[in-house]
């Protein structure tokens, strides 16, 4: 699962806009926009969510779920390694 806040944060970490994320995930710009304006956990078709999360993973973003250990607790995102999207 991914929240709209995590999605926006992941995009910010990669320094990409919504169009670039749409192209990376093979989704429409409107789908990305809808996902980013969701409240809380992003809802959508399983296939679309799978494409989105896979694209973020390929780009080097790790999603931190509420059940995962992190010093501050809660959900978040982080870069797994330096990647080609880093500017």
Image (cartoon, grey):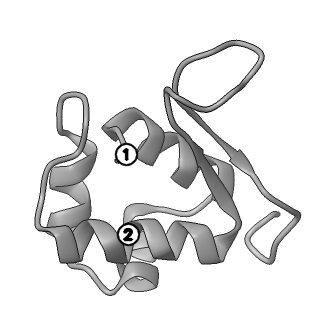
Left or right relative to 47: residue 63: right
Label annotation for residue 52: 2
Among numbered discs 2 and 1, the one appearing first in the sequence: 1
**Mark 1 nearby-residue class (10 Å; few <14, some 14–19, many ≥20):** many
Cβ–Cβ below 8 Å for labels 2 and 1? yes
Q: Nearer the viewer, residue 6 or 14?
A: 6
Residue 64 to residue 29: above or below = above
**Mark 2 nearby-residue class (10 Å; few <14, some 14–19, many ≥20):** many
Label annotation for residue 2: 1
Residue 3 to residue 63: above or below = above
Return the residue found at the far right.
82
Left or right relative to 79: residue 73: left
Return the residue found at the far top.
72
Residue 26 to residue 70: above or below = below
- Residue 71 x/y as whole percent: 77, 16
Q: The residue tagged with tag 1: helix, strand or loop? A: loop
Among the 4 quarters of the image, the one containing residue 74: top right
How far is mark 2 from mark 1, CA to CA? Answer: 10 Å
Residue 1 to residue 18: above or below = above
Residue sitting at x 27%, y 65%: 49
- Residue 45 x/y as whole percent: 11, 67
């Amino acid at each position: 699962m991914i929240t709209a806040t995590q999605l926006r944060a992941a995009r910010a970490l990669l320094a990409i806009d919504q169009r670039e994320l749409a192209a990376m995930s093979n989704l429409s710009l409107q789908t990305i926009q809808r996902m980013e304006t969701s409240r809380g956990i992003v809802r959508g078709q399983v296939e679309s969510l799978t494409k989105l999360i896979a694209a973020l993973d390929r780009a080097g973003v790790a999603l931190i779920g509420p059940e995962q250990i992190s010093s501050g607790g809660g959900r978040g995102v982080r870069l797994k390694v330096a990647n080609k999207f880093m500017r």
